[in-house]
Image (tube, helix red, strand yellow):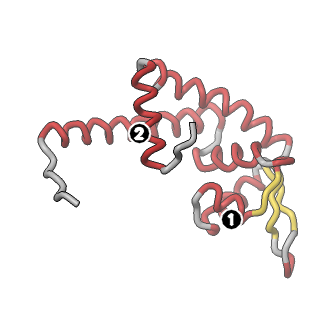
Amino acid sequence: MPEPQPMSDADWAFWDSWMRAQRRMEREVDRALQQDFDISKSEFGILVTLRAAPGGAMRVTELAESLGWEKGRVAHLLTRMEARGFLEREEAGAAGRRTGITLTAVGAERVDRAVLGHGRVIRRLVLDRLAPDQVQAISAWSRAMTGDGSE
């Protein structure tokens, strides 16, 4: 395998602008979810995942795996989200452990509204600023980075 080439000033400038754009998108998405829907980006991820699950229900371990998060992080968020009425946890394991999660009507309504608003933010920040060939190039690169060759 050939030795990697050092990065040029242009390479570093590209990387810096890419990272600044990523941080801006993250801030804007977080701000919009908090301000417009009173949920965090993490809560949004959980709600969207549950909304897509059959019957709006999953096991905690399945949810953690699907999000790529530690089970402890998920459990902490679930406690907070249950208190807000977004989901219900059910005993489904040994020793009274609450291992099942179901999206409530309140949670479903919140995520449905947030998905529409989130889409508007993505369109404003990203899609409206890119030409179709740029979208295709970024999509191809993203699939290569994640190992997802599906179209």
Q: Amino acid at mark 1?
A: Ala
Question: In the rendered image, which quarter contains the N terminus?
Answer: bottom left
Question: In the rendered image, which quarter contains the C terminus?
Answer: top right
Classify residue 37 by image quadrant. top right
Q: Residue furthest bottom?
A: 95
Residue 141 image label: 2
- In the drawing, does residue 47 fall left or right of residue 97? left
> What residue is drawn where x is 60% and y is 45%?
40
What secondary structure is marked by label 1?
A: helix
First along the sequence among labels 1 and 2:
1
Q: How many marks?
A: 2
Is disc 1 surrounded by few (<14), some (14 to 19) or many (20+) residues within 10 Å? some
Which label sits in the foreground, 1 or 2?
2
Is disc 2 surrounded by few (<14), some (14 to 19) or many (20+) residues within 10 Å? few
Q: Amino acid at mark 2?
A: Trp
What secondary structure is marked by label 2?
A: helix
